[in-house]
């Protein structure tokens, strides 16, 4: 069997191999990410993505900026098959990182009640807390029975509206209204704080 001739080509003299111009959907197979064009195309979508998942519109804009900062700050391949997907993955990771930090912070602030209060607890503060709990208990007892049961099932037992509706025979809309009514009444009973 004849062997193939050993052909060596100087890379400087070689002609570049063009990638396919279009795939079946008519889109370019690979796109070079130009930072300004990528930002113009993807920033509004990312802003909507973050706005749906955060409480503050300013925070959403900050997260968009941080997403693009991560893209520019890292060695991104010169060609990306799916820049939108790449940015979405970065955005999801940003949200996941922020959630981890928030959990860590709240764990640091959590006080586990073991029956004994720390010796440094302010007695005046303890009296205020006990007084507020007494007011809250009195306000809860003044709520209609169904409203109180729905509220307790949601806030204490952690049941969803659908679970409460199935358990109590109410519609989900009635459960929503009962919880809203309970919150208004409790807020009114506790007054300004």
Image (cartoon, helix red, strand yellow):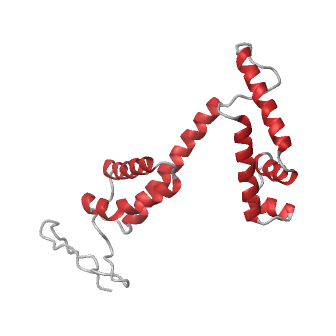
Residue 48: quarter of image: bottom left
Which residue is rendered at x = 70% and y = 15% of the image? 122
x and y, in percent, of residue 142 in the image: 84, 43
Q: Quadrant of the C terminus?
A: top right
x and y, in percent, of residue 177 in the image: 73, 58
Looking at the picture, does residue 170 appear above or below residue 192? below
In the depicted view, which residue is nearer to us: 131 or 43? 131
Looking at the picture, does residue 4 appear above or below residue 69? below
Horizontal side of residue 171 vs 25, given as left or right: right
Number of numbered discs: 0
Q: For the view shown, which residue lies furthest in the left direction?
A: 13
In this view of the protein, can residue 191 be seen by the observer?
A: yes
Q: Quadrant of the N terminus?
A: bottom left
In the depicted view, which residue is nearer to us: 75 or 148? 148
Horizontal side of residue 5 vs 181, given as left or right: left
Horizontal side of residue 88 vs 104, given as left or right: left
In the depicted view, which residue is nearer to us: 23 or 9? 23
In this view of the protein, can residue 121 be seen by the observer?
A: no
Q: For the view shown, which residue lies furthest in the top direction?
A: 119
Residue 192: quarter of image: top right
Which residue is rendered at x = 56% and y = 45% of the image? 99
x and y, in percent, of residue 90 in the image: 44, 55
Horizontal side of residue 171 vs 145, given as left or right: left
Which residue is rendered at x = 22% and y = 75% of the image? 17
In the depicted view, which residue is nearer to us: 103 or 173? 173
Looking at the picture, does residue 2 appear above or below residue 146? below
Which residue is rendered at x = 56% and y = 43% of the image? 100
x and y, in percent, of residue 63 in the image: 42, 49
């Amino acid at each position: 069997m004849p062997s193939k001739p050993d052909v060596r080509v100087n890379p400087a003299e070689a002609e570049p191999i063009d990638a396919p111009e279009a795939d079946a959907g008519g889109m370019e197979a690979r796109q070079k990410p130009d930072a300004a064009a990528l930002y113009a195309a993807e920033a509004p979508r990312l802003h909507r993505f973050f706005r749906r998942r955060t409480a503050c519109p300013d925070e959403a804009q900050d997260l968009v900026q941080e997403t693009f900062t991560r893209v520019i700050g890292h060695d991104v391949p010169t060609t990306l098959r799916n820049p939108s997907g790449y940015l979405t993955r970065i955005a999801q990771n940003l949200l996941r990182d922020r959630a981890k930090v928030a959990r860590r912070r709240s764990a640091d602030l959590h006080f586990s009640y073991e029956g004994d209060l720390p010796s440094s607890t302010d007695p005046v503060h303890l009296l205020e807390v006990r007084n507020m709990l007494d007011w809250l208990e009195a306000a809860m007892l003044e709520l209609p029975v169904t409203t109180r049961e729905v509220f307790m099932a949601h806030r204490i037992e952690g049941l969803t509206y659908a679970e409460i509706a199935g358990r109590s025979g109410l519609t989900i809309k009635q459960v929503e209204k009962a919880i809203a009514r309970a919150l208004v009444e409790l807020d009114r009973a506790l007054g300004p704080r």
